[in-house]
Image (cartoon, rainbow, N blue to C red):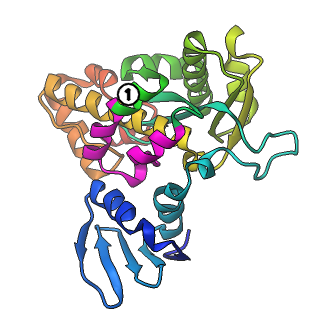
Amino acid sequence: MTNTYSCKTDISRESTLKAILEQQGFSFKSADHAYWRAQNKEITVTFYKSGKLLVQGKDADTFATTCLKEKQDAKSVIPVQTTFSAAVAPVWDAWIGTDESGKGDYFGPLVIAGVLADKDNIEKLAKLGAADSKTLNDGFIAKIAPEIKALTTFAVVVINPAKYNELYKKIGNLNNLLAWGHARAIENILEKKPCQNALSDKFGNESLIKNALLKNGRNINLVQRTKAESDIAVAAASILARDEYVRRMKKMSSEYGIELPKGASELVISRAKEFVGKHGREKLAEVAKLHFKTTNSLA
């Protein structure tokens, strides 16, 4: 990942780019020879009157290509052949994208979502600002998630902590558990609407999801690639997964009377100890993923 990214962009996109950044909570100020300079805690975006777009900060290239550059043309976010064989079609008329949220978080569920993108909704999804959820704030995600659901055929699979821990004991591997969830999301969409193609982020052996698919999904053309969240369908799925994860975390925090933080930081360890002190260690399985190293820190 690079810390600086620049490209030439049509100046007619100035208002569109500004709207995208405003939706994500960026603040704006003036800059020499530029329409504006936008900033958040990690990224600075400057759009010059020459048409030069300069992005600086953490993972600048990823932010620019997944969040800004893709908005130029909705067709550009259709899956394209990258590291795959020539058998992979460069353009699909319709495809299911899947992504997950909560995988690296000690507290809360694992959520896998799927979204079916097609020629009728890809431009609308792009106009909504659908992008990798990691580049969006939770407020914006909460706003557009219902709109994505209204536009698409979708599925959201929630594996709550108690079920997650039960399945992990049986399966014994996170990648296998992820594959099971992605396969269920694909199958649930196929029950509503037929589709011949699916795209997911690549994790573990490529056969994992294929082997987890049931009757409806066995014949689907499944492609897995790194950085799949740059695709519009996968990005939309990431938004639905994140929205569901955040809502479940709020509900869980309210239910147990403790603000459960995201991630796996020192604060998480502190809150886990607080939870055990208040509710007992046996209740931890109802809110946390017990195989995380965090659990060992509570002894």
Residue 119's x, y, as percent?
59, 34
Magenta segment's dominant SS is: helix
Which quadrant holds the C terminus? Answer: top left
> Is residue 138 positioned above or below 112 on the image?
below
Q: Dividing the picture into quarters, in which one does residue 281 lie? A: top left
The reply to whether residue 278 is visible in this rendering is yes
**Going 35% across and 57% down the picture, which residue do you hit?**
20
Which residues are drawn in magenta? 122-146
The reply to whether residue 268 is visible in this rendering is no
Task: Find the residue positioned furthest to the front.
Answer: 12
Q: Dividing the picture into quarters, in which one does residue 92 lie? A: top right
* Horizontal relation, residue 233 to residue 42: left or right: right
Query: Of residues 213 and 279, which is closer to you in this image?
Result: 213
Q: Dividing the picture into quarters, in which one does residue 183 lie? A: top right
> Is residue 98 positioned above or below 262 on the image?
above
Query: Of residues 175 and 237, which is closer to you in this image?
Result: 237
Label 1: element kind: loop
Task: Find the residue positioned furthest to the bottom.
Answer: 32
Residue 64's x, y, as percent?
49, 65
Task: Find the residue positioned furthest to the right.
Answer: 86
Residue 68's x, y, as percent?
46, 61
**Going 52% across and 28% down the picture, which residue do you hit?**
114
Q: Quick check: is 142 in the magenta stretch?
A: yes
Residue 49's x, y, as percent?
40, 83
> Is residue 14 positioned above or below 278 on the image?
below
**Going 41% across and 39% down the picture, which residue do you hit?**
239
Q: Residues within 10 Å of mark 1 (few under 14, many from 20)?
A: many
For label 1, the residue is 109
Q: Quick check: is 133 in the magenta stretch?
A: yes
* Horizontal relation, residue 231 to residue 235: left or right: right
The amino acid beneath tag 1 is: Pro
Query: Of residues 31 and 64, which is closer to you in this image?
Result: 31
